[in-house]
Amino acid sequence: QIQLVESGGGSVETGGSLRLSCAGSGPTYAYDPPPCMGWFRRAPGKEREGVASISSGGDFTYYADSVKGRFTISQDTAKNMVYLQMDNLKPEDTAMYYCAASTWYSGNACRPQESRYTNWGQGTQVTVSS
């Protein structure tokens, strides 16, 4: 069983930055980490949407068009951590952000599509004021 815990959310003004962190754990996580990790978000009144994803080797990353050039996903496999650096934040980025793990998809198939993910964190709130 994989456990994911997000942190780093908060309130910032437009143009500000935040760095979200996702700590992974579980009986096998350290030596058999998920091949694909993603970040998703759900804004009030909207469905959850994929933001970014990264394959286990970091070879493949994907971003939603709405965050390209502003957000960067990265990972530190030694620490079992995945990060989402968010720069030039906009009010429309306001949402609950979730970290997720996919145990089935890897490499180029690692995409920020909700149906591909099997484990989810509880979320961390990001609020961007204008």
Image: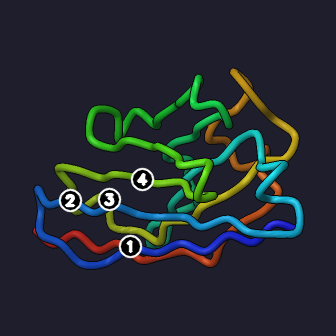
Q: Secondary structure at mark 4?
A: strand
* Residue 66, image quadrant: top left
Residue type, numbered disc 1: Gly
Give the colour scheme of this rendering: rainbow
The residue lying toward the viewer, choosing from 94 and 3, is 3
The location of residue 36, given as percent across then percent down, is: 71, 41
- In the rendered image, which residue does mark 2 sit on? 17
Which numbered mark, 3 or 2, is in the foreground of this view?
Answer: 2
Rendered position, 83 above or below 119? above
Q: 127 left or right of 26? A: left
Pointers 3 and 1 in contact (C-beta within 8 Å): no
Q: Which mark is residue 8?
A: 1
Amino acid at circle 2: Ser
What is the distance, in whole Å, between disc 2 and disc 4 at their CAs? 10 Å
Residue located at (88% from left, 68% from top) = 27
Label of residue 93 in the image: 3
Q: Residues within 10 Å of mark 4 (few under 14, many from 20)?
A: many
Q: CA distance from mark 4 to mark 3?
A: 13 Å
Cα distance, mark 3 to mark 1? 15 Å
